[in-house]
Image (spheres, grey):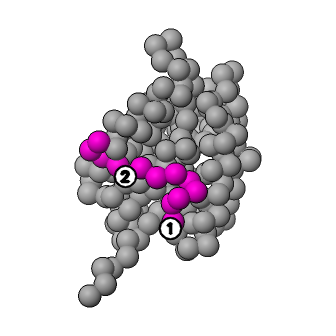
Amino acid sequence: MPQPSCRKALLIIDMQVGLFHGAVPPFAGDRVLANINQLIANARCAGAPILAVRHTGPQGSPLAPDGPLTQLIPQLDVQSERDILFSKTRPNCFHETELAPLLRQRAIDELVVVGMKTEFCIDSTCRAAADGGWKVTLIADAHTTMDTAALSADAIVAHHNATLSAAFVTLSTAQAYSF
């Protein structure tokens, strides 16, 4: 008997003006953005939900929910009238958000994770999703960060791909992934 197929959703994390177009550009930003946009197109063709989350802070802060730094970058092919947009205030996209109930309501059992920043929100969300019982696919060439004093951004991305794939995610590339 054939196995039932997974119901998949694409989760795009923090592809917002204040991070992507900040003072320090993200590692391989143009490639990551192109890969995410390709995944969005593939998800749409397959009828998979597209969820985009942005990190916000309190009113009056640089990350105020209605401020310019928290808006999704215009180059991202997310469509507010058709895709699911929500906000978070912590690195873990599940913490005090509607993400888990939404995934359960739609019977999503695989979350495809892309976006920013690798060592914070990507890492926290991948671990939380796996702990919550979802299959997680991390797209190795569709998440990014910036250099830190301790490590270069490409080393951070490579380290997290290796570490997360050891216990929490399945790795794929944008080109190889199929919805």
Would you call the spot at circle 1 few (<14 residues within 10 Å), some (14-19), or many (20 or more)? some
Quadrant of the snapshot with the N terminus? bottom left
The mark total stands at 2
Kindly identify the residue that appears in the image at 64 percent across and 34 percent down. 28
Under tag 2, what secondary structure?
Answer: strand
Furthest-front residue in this view: 176
Q: Is residue 175 above or below residue 87?
A: below
Query: In the drawing, does residue 147 fall left or right of residue 169?
Result: right
Dot label at residue 179: 1
Under tag 1, what secondary structure?
Answer: loop
Q: CA distance from mark 1 to mark 2?
A: 14 Å
Kindly identify the residue that appears in the image at 65 percent across and 64 percent down. 41
Check residue 176 for magenta coloring.
Answer: yes
Can you tell which quarter of the image residue 105 is in?
Answer: bottom left
Q: Is residue 49 above or below residue 98?
A: below
Q: Are marks 1 and 2 in contact (CB under 8 Å)?
A: no
Would you call the spot at circle 2 few (<14 residues within 10 Å), some (14-19), or many (20 or more)? some
Residue 31 screen position, x and y as percent: 66, 42
Q: Nearer the viewer, residue 156 or 18?
A: 156
Which range is magenta?
166-179
Furthest-bottom residue in this view: 1
Residue 129 screen position, x and y as percent: 33, 51
Give the amino acid at mark 1: Phe
Q: Main secondary structure of the magenta part?
A: loop
Furthest-right residue in this view: 74
Residue 158 screen position, x and y as percent: 46, 33
Q: Is residue 4 above or below residue 61?
A: below
Q: Nearer the viewer, residue 150 or 70?
A: 150
Q: Nearer the viewer, residue 50 or 156?
A: 156
Check residue 173 for magenta coloring.
Answer: yes
Give the amino acid at mark 2: Thr
Residue under label 2: 170
